[in-house]
Amino acid sequence: MSPSIEELIRHSKIYLTDLNSSRLKRAYQFANKAHEGQLRKGGDPYIVHPLSTAIILTELHVDEDTLIAALLHDVPEDTEYNLEDIEKTFGKKITFLVEGITKLSKVHYRHNMEERQVESLKKLFIHSAKDIRVILIKLADRLHNMMTIQAIPKPEKRIRIAKETLEIYVPIANILGIWELKSQLEDLCFKTLYPEEFAHIEKKVMERSSKLSETLKKTINQIKKILSMNGVKSFKIEGRKKTYYSIYQKMFRKGKNFEEIYDLIGLRIIVPDVGSCYQVLGILHQNFTPKLGRLKDYIAIPKSNGYQSIHTTIFGVDGHLTELQIRTHEMQIESEYGVAANYFYNKSKGKNKGQSKWVQKILDIQRDMKSNEDFIEELKLDLFEDRIFAFTPKGDVIDLPRGATVLDFAYHIHSEIGNHANSATVNKKEMPLDAVLHTGDVIEVVLSESVGPSISSLEIVRTNLAKNRIREFLKNQSRSILQDQGGKLLTHKLKLFGHCGAEEVSADQKKAVEKMYDKSWKNILIDVGSGLIDPRDIIKVVFSMKELIGEEISPVNLKAYSHVIAPPKIHKIHFLVEGVNRVGLLRDVTIELASLNINLLKMNIYTTENADKSILDFFAEIRDLKHFESAVNAMKKVPGVLKISKINEEVRGQA
Ligand code: MN
């Protein structure tokens, strides 16, 4: 059934007590007239779309202006009316929002356009940061388009739209913490892109859910009883829905079977205040055995996106594993509606200036970052990925992206500490600067008067903050030191990729590089030494990618990449890894490669004649030079590995 303006008004009045419904009606009539005679692909009158978009937005409790802009969002693009007409009738504020949406619709997505994707993502963000409401309208717009995607006759077009949604809109909803929209979008994309898998999971869920609902009911009843008996007066328990896409991802990525994932009961317990969260946790742990290692206190230490909640898993009714999230009502609203909650909910309570720390973070990153790549890298690090929390000896928390090292930690305390860091003790054990940190580590940085970072320090830090500070330091080094370091780094990289050192780069090759940078070889080395030129870029001028990391192929296992932003180009590379003949060598090497998401093709193991060495001979799928380096570095760390070589058809070399 088609929605009506009355329905929109009814939904809005629930939370907007001072709604000016005649203003909303006026916007509806304006849009209705502008779109008159236009039909949606499914045959509905066009107005159904902006109206549905606005109704979706009422779930996020958006303000009146946002609803009006949602009603008008396709007018300038698709009708004879323009922004001036809108401004005449609705004023500047509404026009600003509609203009923002119109601009966003010009950001086009195509397959395999990594640079463009980065650019479009960036534009989306810049705009959303200017006014978060624009992005909320865009997300709701997309959600309604995905809900009606079956009406689009061409399958290629449906797939393109679903991919665009999965790769651009879902991550944005994720960054903004709007799970409610994110999970709906995700499941609709999943259904469009993988109809068979979707149907398979849907069927299993149907079969299983009736059996499970019995246990679920019992669990909820028992927990209610226990909490009441122990004096918890006010609480709410709700079951958590698992999205089909999340089930699919867990099955695929973690290799679990359906029952393992689906049979987990997920419950959320919502209480009025923080004290009650811990009280409930204590009571439940007294009455049920908790599963070891599953307690996470994101109230005491919130995630970097601000998420707060206590997570634990207990052996519940009949020993059934039950995942619990315990949080306050406010945390609940914030976790479901993220930025929207911050913006509208807190604003309506007069609590903060209406801009969340997420938005502030995006603005900060924009200001600091110059290139697109840096921007998106930093965003990925700061918002997409998991964070770790490490501690100073005094107990201050430093939060860092996963994979951050001791040196990152040092720079995050202070640039001088980073510049003079020599080594560290991690949990009282001595560790080098490139040791990777984990949550809960206590780090004491050991300083030295003389040392300073060198260009190779850039290779062991993960955060852009540390990288920028190292570059800052290098800028003030003498040119001869920089040239020397640049030459050494280039040689190191050349050898890594199986070629000669920098001193053996031929005159012709140097000329080609000089031409590309429009600089002398000496100045190029100085730039490498100061971190301005990535030595890999030089290597790419001198050698072809095929020479460096093998022939380009389509990934053999395409589905392994269904969850990543851009379907990667893949190089097939032939490795020979020589190591001590010991139990577990193959296992340890393959574990390292698997953790880098490297697919292996065809593998052989030989033993040398006197059986003291093993040789692993295999093909691996490698994305790019950095990926190759990580693979080599990871394998080097495996105990017993002696030599890693790569074999090319034309070029043979050692890594
Ligand atoms: Mn639209």
Image (cartoon, rainbow, N blue to C red):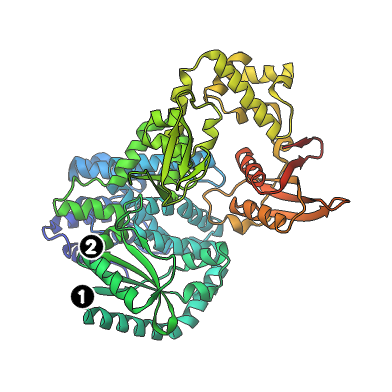
Q: Quadrant of residue 536?
A: top right
Q: Marks 1/2: CA distance?
A: 13 Å
Drawn side of residue 278 relative to residue 555, left or right: left
Specify few, some or many for label 1: CA neighbours under 10 Å numbering under 14, 14-19, or 20 or more: some
Residue in the foreground of this view, choosing between 617 and 622:
617
Q: Looking at the figure, which quarter contains the N terminus?
A: bottom left
**Residue 618 position (above or below residue 466):** below
In-image side of 289 versus 228 (left or right)? right
> Where does the image place residue 256, in percent across and percent down from the top left?
56, 69
Tell me where residue 40 appears, x and y as whole percent: 39, 59
Q: Is residue 484 visible?
A: yes
Circle 1 sits in a helix, a strand or a loop, which is it?
loop
Q: Nearer the viewer, residue 109 or 236?
A: 236
Residue at image position (53%, 39%) is 432
Residue at the spot of label 2:
274
Q: In which quadrant will I find the C terminus?
A: top right
> Tag 2 or tag 1, which sits nearer the N-term?
1
Looking at the image, residue 29 lies above or below residue 215 = above
Residue 232 numbered mark, or none: 1
